[in-house]
Image: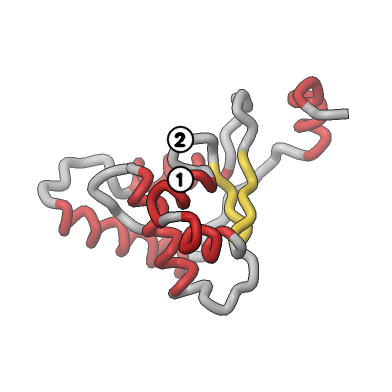
Amino acid sequence: MQVTRHRKKADFVHFLRQLLQGRYRDAQKVHLVVDNLNTHFAKVFVEILGSQRAQKLLSRIEFHYTPKHGSWLNMAEIEIGILDKQCLNRKIPTEAELVTHVRAWNRRRNRQKKTIDWSFTRQDADQKLGKHYVA
């Protein structure tokens, strides 16, 4: 988890570059589940890094997009909601303090090995989203 001042294309690209060169440097392929925000596409990497540098990173990323019109909450949204309620529900005066609070919350959450009881099954998805499937 990382706190950034903005939510711009360059922030997203640099965050993923840090992950691929750091924590996941030995991974051949990273599967990335993202929504359809305008910053979450391969073309953004080319725009920010140039074609050659972008392709080097993109060869190791496989994007998986959440449904554009899915009204159900996915696990990432649930986790962000928990972060908001447990950590961000007050005024935090500086960016440095925000970073400190978010990192502490993240460490605690991971140490506690908290999970989400996800009850949305494949059958539920078929029923609710079947009309969006390609035959």
Q: In this view, does 84 lie above or below 48?
A: above
Q: In which quarter of the image is the C terminus?
A: top right
Would residue 1 be seen by someone viewing this image from the given angle? no
User: Could you tell which of marks 2 and 1 lies nearer the N-terminus?
Assistant: 2
* Residue 2 figure quarter: bottom left
**Residue at the image point whose x is 64% and y is 55% from the top:** 62
User: Which residue is at the front of the view, 74 or 30?
Assistant: 30
Q: Is residue 116 above or below residue 38?
A: below
Residue 57 is left or right of residue 1, and the answer is right
Q: Is mark 1 on a helix, strand or loop?
A: helix
In percent of width and height, residue 120 lies at: 71, 37
In percent of width and height, residue 31 lies at: 63, 58
Quick check: marks 2 and 1 in contact, CB under 8 Å?
A: yes
Alpha-carbon neighbours of circle 1 within 10 Å: few (<14), some, or many (≥20)?
Answer: some
Residue identified by numbered label 1: 44
Would residue 38 be seen by someone viewing this image from the given angle? yes
Image disc number at residue 38: 2
The residue sitting at the right extreme is 135
Q: Which amino acid does label 1 sit on?
A: Val
